[in-house]
Image: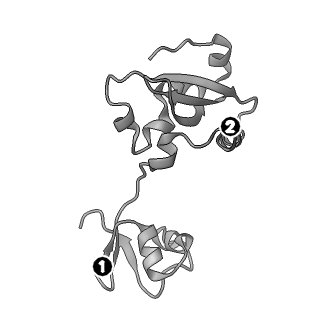
Amino acid sequence: MKFTCDPDLADKNPYVVYILKDSANVIQFIGACKYSSVVCTPDARKNTLFYKVFPPGAEMTVEIIHVSDNEKRYLATNFIHGWILENGRPFMLRFGGRIGSAKPVKCVDTGVIYPTQRDAAKALGVSQSQMSNHMMRRPGYTKCAGKTFVWAIND
């Protein structure tokens, strides 16, 4: 990967919007991050397809297409949404998912283990935010749909 550092941008370290192209010059991803992190392509590496599209040693081009004037990430994200409306979703955004930190959840009352709190909320017919509040043990959320849940990390 080739990258030329712009000293002015390095000093300001603004949010930038970048696209990743493969060896055939096809746009595979669009993301946003601080200028100092753009070489690491942090958003792209969280995509489930990143290492399939760009295996170790694969050629990739990182192109900065927008520099935000502001310190707010949402302005860079708004630019991405506009770009997608004009150009369509790149492959990795259409077919890849985000690698998250989802953890399994166990119902203490029934012993059922769900892959994520989202799956548990869906199965119980409650909102994901209600399940999240219960898992965070926030006041007023001692039970969720009449049941108690814990993280099932060690099970």
Q: Residue furthest bottom?
A: 146
Q: Which mark is residue 76?
A: 2
Task: Give the amino acid at mark 2.
Answer: Ala
Q: Quadrant of residue 71?
A: top right
Q: Nearer the viewer, mark 2 or mark 1?
A: 2
Residue at 32% across, 22% down: 57
Residue 45, image x and y in percent? 43, 37
Quick check: can you spot residue 143? no
- Helix, strand or loop under label 2: helix
Residue 18, image x and y in percent? 59, 29
Q: Which mark is residue 137?
A: none
Q: Residue furthest left?
A: 155
Circle nearer the N terminus (2, 1): 2
51 to 65, vertically: above or below = below
- Helix, strand or loop under label 1: loop
Task: Give the amino acid at mark 1.
Answer: Val
Mark-to-mark CA distance, 2 and 1: 41 Å
- Give the quarter of the figure containing the C terminus: bottom left
Residue at 38% across, 35% down: 53
Quick check: can you spot residue 130? yes
User: In this image, 14 relative to 2: left or right?
Assistant: right
Question: Residue under circle 1?
Answer: 112
Q: Quadrant of residue 84?
A: top right
